[in-house]
Image (cartoon, rainbow, N blue to C red):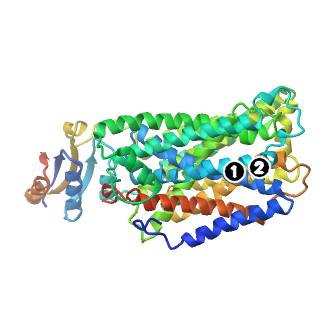
Amino acid sequence: MAIDKYIMGLFKSEDQAVAAVHGLKESKWTLHRIHSPIPSHKLSEALKLKTSKVGWFTLCGGIFGFFAGFALAILTAERWDLIVSGKPVRALVPFVIVGFEFTVLFAILGNLVGFLTQTRLPRMQNLEHYDERCSGEHFGVLASCQEDQQEGLHSLFVENGGIVRVFD
Amino acid sequence: MADEGKKSSYWIVWVAMVVIGFGTFIYLAASGRPDQAWKAYLINFLIWSAIAQGGMLFSTLMHTVKAKWSGSLSGLSEAFTGFFPVSLILFLFLFLGGAHVFPWSHGHDLHGKEVWLNIPFLFTRDLIALFILYGLGFGYLYYSLQLKKVDTTNGKGIIRTLFRILQGGRQLEPEVIRKRMDLLAILYMLAFALVLSLIGYDLVMALDPHWISTLFGAYTFVKAIYVGLGGLIIFAAVMHLNPKNDFTLPSSQFHDIGKLFFAFCLVWADFFYVQLVVIWYGNIPEETAYVIERVMMVPWKYLAWFVFAVSFVIPFFILLNKKVKTMPAFMMVLAACMIAGIWLEHLLLVGPSLSHSVHTLPLGINDILISLGFLGLMLLALNSFLRQFPELARTEKREVS
């Protein structure tokens, strides 16, 4: 049985990378990973990525924070019978400020948790089959094929304007 | 709406709306209810002028921050200048109803505020202020049209002819035009904040001459941006949805203006709240009386909650969703509901000062008919403007690619 070869196409432009992705989707080769120096809507569309779930983490964090803020303000005021300016101890009008601030705080924390869990960070090991040019200005498209088909995959990347790197 | 210089087939309907509105106003004034007629007139003058002023602000704002996404929306935003002359004339007419819209002008002890609160001075300063604001708006438009390479050497219309005379066949370098636009855009925004604050203090806050909220001016111009964006969304959606127009926007632009609209929904609520919390803590009778009457007394308290729900709570929760912001028809309905909410908010602000000791809301079919008349005026102004400058209602090619 033929061994899988990992081949990376390195592209200087977003459109070239998108064209290579489309070419790979129509081929029998397996697309493994994309590296992009910028957030790219075109690549997201080409890859048909599912909608990110990070927003839900943010929303849940915000809702939790809203009630937590009110709860903190109410419990603290009631615990110490804080009377400010002759107002009731449980004064909802000013507690909106605490509720609002906590909404923002916990929405951000929720967003951070969502980001870390959804992107599976932190990653303790280095990536396999990685080219350092992907940390610069290049778009990297990593795909694999059987050893006897590497010429076809190689030419797909070259036809789309890429530089090719074959991993051992 | 802008059929290449042709009159829209709807213009008869719009003229009919204006006639109905004007007729209702005359009927009310002649049948012994001038207070009701002038109250509706004041509210409508404030809200429709704010839509035009805030709508135009969008273009100046986008130009100043060098935004690239706004494109064709800026052209539509500039069409709101068509309502500026109408607004100025409507303000002059307000002078006739001075005794009805300014309760302090008769039988009130103003405790030294007479220097500021007297009808001749009020009208003079507000007229000058509006004149400056609208002048800057037209100045910006003049250069913006030149930058868009709108050929004013032919075509009809008062504004187009005026610009042709001003231009006199001269062609300025794009860089010079941009610099002048930068200056005029910043001056317009500055004037917007100052003039709208003045209008807020003079035509709304001063109706109860003993009540003071220093933030009321800022609240007024933030509200004008909010309704201006609402008006622009409705305008863009109508233009986009009508296949007869050469105007389409990608959903990403509706999404972007939807986000801006959402942001100002929050800013408006914030300015409302920061006034409330200071008055609530301060607990000074001359400040709290105004709020208590509006949020705790019948019949106004129900209106207060309704306004808060329609103008903030409902748009806030709906606009959290990304998809709805990309749906022009839905956004049009939402923005229309919000503007109706702000109309009622104006009623809440001026109503108790003008209609004392009422047990039911002083709101009826006559108010709706008068508002219809103002809507007709706005539609005629926008249509007339786009007939003169159909170039502004075309999609820039790079946006649809």
* A35 with respect to B219 (left or right): left
Q: Foreground: B4 or A115?
A: B4
Q: Residues within 10 Å of mark 1 (few under 14, many from 20)?
A: few
x then y, percent, for residue B190 = 54, 33
Q: Is residue B13 above or below residue A50?
A: below
Q: Is residue B25 visible?
A: yes
Q: Is residue B69 visible?
A: no
Badge number at residue B93: 1
Circles 2 and 1 on the same subunit: yes
Picture quarter containing residue B359? bottom right
Residue in the image at 56% along x and 46% along y: B53
* A124 with respect to B211 (left or right): left
Q: Is mark 1 on a helix, strand or loop?
A: helix
Letter of the chain that mark 1 sits on in the rendering: B
x then y, percent, for residue B309 = 71, 53
Alpha carbon of mark 2 to alpha carbon of mark 1: how far? Answer: 7 Å
Q: Which amino acid does label 1 sit on?
A: Phe
Badge number at residue B97: 2
Badge 2 vs badge 1, beta-carbon distance below 8 Å: yes
Letter of the chain that mark 2 sits on in the rendering: B
Residue in the image at 22% along x and 50% along y: A141
Q: Foreground: A136 or B254?
A: B254
